[in-house]
Image: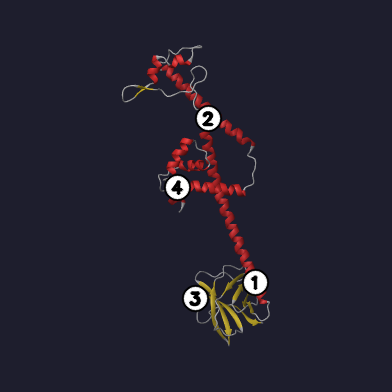
């Protein structure tokens, strides 16, 4: 299933990508992990992202040598968290000032314990909420330090910030690793194909040197060697080197020459001038040939007789 198809189902949103990565990294707090786990059960896109992240982390662990992080990374993260805390402190201070301006001006000062302030009737009326029965619901618990200053849950916010930053970094690493992996696979496939071509050429040259094996060197009209035909009894093989690639509406044809009459033995394509081996189906009814020829024909099938011969050669034993 393609990524585009996956992301159209399950109520997927852009924020879910980072959450899916953080879920795979176990970087969510318990409440977030529980909520996202429920979403994950119905979202194929997020399951796909979690699976990709785990697979990528496995590839990273097996292929990347461990290195120390940049020394400035820790200080940058701590500075960013400190900056966020400073901004949050300013917001809390402004909120307290606004509350004082709105009428909470009878709060005691000096060394009066904060419990006396928070338990005053006026403060209780302002903070309480009424339920359906008209009774006052308990005010939410507040964390306090010296005096009556409200202290926000900084650690949770800092942890969330670091988790999101880590998730974003892993998303970037996943994308970068995917590109590198694709490039490495392409290079590997190219090298494997080249190794197979070279092995086939070596096998064919080895067979041509064996006594009794039919073989012929193919030359173009100017006398330059452009290939070879070898038949060890399992069917002719054609080695081409220096021939131009044929167009999609053309085909190369191998001909067997017997009693002066050319006989089409098979067709093949040439992709370029690099040495390549092409197998031609064997025919038990084929007579011994005195020579072979190659022609380049229009269309995709062999004609009754060659149109344009590009190479030929006599059989040697």
Q: In this rendering, is residue 144 above or below 22?
A: above
Residue at 58% in and 31% down: 78
Q: Quadrant of residue 316?
A: bottom right
Q: In this rendering, is residue 112 above or below 41?
A: above
Q: Are marks 2 and 4 in contact (CB under 8 Å)?
A: no
Q: Find the distance from the CA under tag 2 to the CA under tag 1.
A: 69 Å
Which of the numbered marks, if any, corresponds to residue 45?
A: 4
Q: Find the distance from the CA under tag 1 to the CA under tag 3.
A: 28 Å
- Mark found first going from the N terminus, 2 or 1: 2
Where residue 59 appears, as percent x and y from the top left, is 58, 49
> SS at mark 3?
loop
Where residue 302 appears, as percent x and y from the top left, is 51, 78
Q: Residues within 10 Å of mark 3 (few under 14, many from 20)?
A: some
Q: Residues within 10 Å of mark 1 (few under 14, many from 20)?
A: few
Q: Residues within 10 Å of mark 2 (few under 14, many from 20)?
A: few
Which of the numbered marks, if any, corresponds to residue 301?
A: 3
- Mark found first going from the N terminus, 1 or 3: 1
Q: Quadrant of residue 123?
A: top left
Q: Find the distance from the CA under tag 3 to the CA under tag 4.
A: 48 Å
- Identify the image quadrant of the C terminus: bottom right
Q: In this rendering, is residue 303 above or below 115?
A: below
Residue lying at the far bottom of the rendered structure:
259
Q: Are marks 1 and 3 in contact (CB under 8 Å)?
A: no
Q: Find the distance from the CA under tag 2 to the CA under tag 3.
A: 75 Å
- Identify the image quadrant of the N terminus: bottom left
Which of the numbered marks, if any, corresponds to residue 29?
A: none
What residue would you read off at disc 2?
A: 155
Nearer the camera: disc 2 or disc 3:
2
């Amino acid at each position: 299933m393609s990524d585009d198809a996956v992301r159209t189902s399950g109520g997927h949103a852009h924020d879910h990508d980072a959450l899916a990565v953080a879920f795979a990294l176990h970087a969510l707090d318990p409440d977030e992990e529980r909520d996202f786990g429920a979403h994950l059960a119905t979202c194929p896109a997020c399951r796909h992202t979690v699976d990709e992240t785990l697979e990528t982390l496995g590839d990273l662990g097996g292929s990347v040598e461990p290195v120390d992080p940049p020394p400035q990374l820790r200080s940058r993260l701590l500075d960013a968290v400190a900056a966020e805390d400073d901004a949050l402190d300013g917001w809390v201070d402004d909120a307290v000032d606004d509350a004082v301006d709105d009428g909470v001006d009878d709060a005691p000062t000096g060394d009066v314990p904060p419990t006396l302030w928070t338990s005053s009737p006026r403060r209780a009326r302002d903070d309480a909420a009424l339920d359906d029965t008209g009774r006052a619901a308990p005010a939410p618990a507040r964390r306090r330090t010296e005096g009556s200053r409200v202290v926000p849950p900084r650690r949770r916010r800092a942890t969330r910030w670091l988790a999101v930053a880590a998730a974003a970094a892993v998303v970037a690493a996943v994308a970068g690793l995917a590109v590198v992996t694709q490039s490495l696979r392409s290079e590997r496939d190219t090298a494997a194909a080249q190794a197979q071509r070279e092995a086939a050429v070596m096998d064919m040259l080895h067979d041509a040197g064996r006594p009794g094996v039919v073989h012929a060197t193919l030359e173009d009209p100017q006398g330059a060697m452009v290939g070879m035909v070898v038949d060890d009894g399992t069917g002719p093989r054609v080695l081409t080197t220096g021939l131009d690639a044929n167009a999609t509406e053309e085909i190369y044809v191998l001909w067997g020459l017997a009693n002066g009459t050319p006989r089409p033995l098979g067709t093949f394509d040439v992709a370029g001038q690099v040495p390549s081996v092409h197998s031609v189906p064997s025919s038990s009814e084929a007579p011994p040939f005195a020579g072979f020829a190659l022609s380049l024909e229009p269309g995709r099938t062999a004609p009754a007789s060659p149109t344009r011969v590009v190479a030929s050669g006599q059989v040697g034993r």
